[in-house]
Image: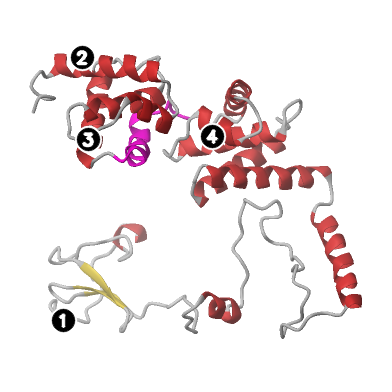
Amino acid sequence: MIPPNTASTSIRRQPESEAETSPTHRSTCVECDGTVIYSEDKGEYHCDACGLVLEESNIDRGPEWRAFTERETSQKSRVGAPITHTLHDKGLSTMIGWRNEDTYGNALSKRQQQKFQRLRTWDERFRTRDSKERNLKQALGEIDRMASALDLPTPIRETASVIYRRALEKDLLRGRSIEGVGASALYAAARQANTPRSLDEVAAVSRIGKSKLARTYRYVARELALGIAPDDPTDYLPRFASDCEVSVETETRARHLLEVAAEQDALSGKSPVGLAAAAIYAATRRTEDSLTQADASEVTNVSKVTIRNRYQELLEIADDADPNELES
């Protein structure tokens, strides 16, 4: 029988489910509640307090080679790029490179260059064999362009591409532009990821107007049953605070203003973007940060009239809820 305090002891309790007791899902030891750490040298998970080995002889699923530069990685790697929905063929097809040189970096002759140019042309035609694939290729390119302009991460681009594919499959593009549905998919994906961008911001980087974008978004969201929750003004605070270059204290006070207003049910029917901009400006009046209404309007793309009206409402609500809170 193995003593309970032996370091090489494996798990003795019968797990109720594999996900509950797997070391990759557990951060504390099953014996002493110590911290579970991973040893790369031994390939095992063990407790740093009692030494209990929770899992050993783990398979290293990484490559057997090492690379220190991007060039070495591309030379040694024996696999291609992962599957992605941001490409119309999901990245599964091959593509002839645009460089007119051979494997050793030597320039091709004129005749070889003409030959490969014809091959590139036919390769491009085979990759987009019908109108649906051409539509998808153009739309995904537009989504990637707009996402880059809005500084949105790759997961949101993937989600937007999936939403557009669903819209294309359900034939929702009839009578609507590719840019409109693509911008609507990106706007919906950003809201789903709690990294929202306002309609004005999305319309500014797209080729359609704000009103048309809003109509298309409502139609796509309804037909695909996306079930997106209303915008939360606090989701805009980190970005606005960073763009306005205000302190963490100001951002914290702005968040408090919005939370108090939400408790008083005073946010309904008001633009989340306008509320966030007004909260930032209102908070600066209680901190050492200096921010004018004109600067806040320019950075957040919210009118000065909206900021002036909303910030006064937020201060009055917060002052009525706790008169001493904002004076501290």
Compared with residue 271, is residue 50 higher up or lower down, i.e. above or below? below
**Between 191 and 104, which is closer to the camera in this rendering?**
104
Specify the quadrant that holds the C terminus.
top left
In which image quadrant can residue 7 be found? bottom left
Mark 4 and mark 1: span between their CA atoms? 56 Å
Q: Is residue 169 above or below residue 92?
A: above
The magenta region covers 228-245
Chief secondary structure of the magenta span?
helix
Instruction: Give the mark, 4 or 1, whose residue is nearer the N terminus.
Output: 1
- Determine whether the residue tagged by mark 1 lies in a helix, strand or loop: loop
User: What is the number of the mark on residue 289?
Assistant: 3
Q: Mark 1 sits on what residue?
A: 6
Residue 159 in magenta?
no
SS category of the residue bearing label 2: helix
Q: Which residue is mark 2?
A: 316
Mark 3–mark 4 CB contact (< 8 Å): no
> Which badge, 2 or 4, comes first in the chain's sequence?
4
Disc nearer the start of the sequence (3/1): 1
Residue for badge 4: 187
* Disc 2 to disc 3: CB gap under 8 Å: no
- Above or below, 55 relative to 308: below
Left or right: 79 with respect to 324?
A: right
- Name the one closer to the observer, 91 or 51: 91
Q: Nearer the viewer, mark 2 or mark 4?
A: 2
Residue 60 locus on image (x, y percent): 43, 78
Q: Residues within 10 Å of mark 4 (few under 14, many from 20)?
A: many
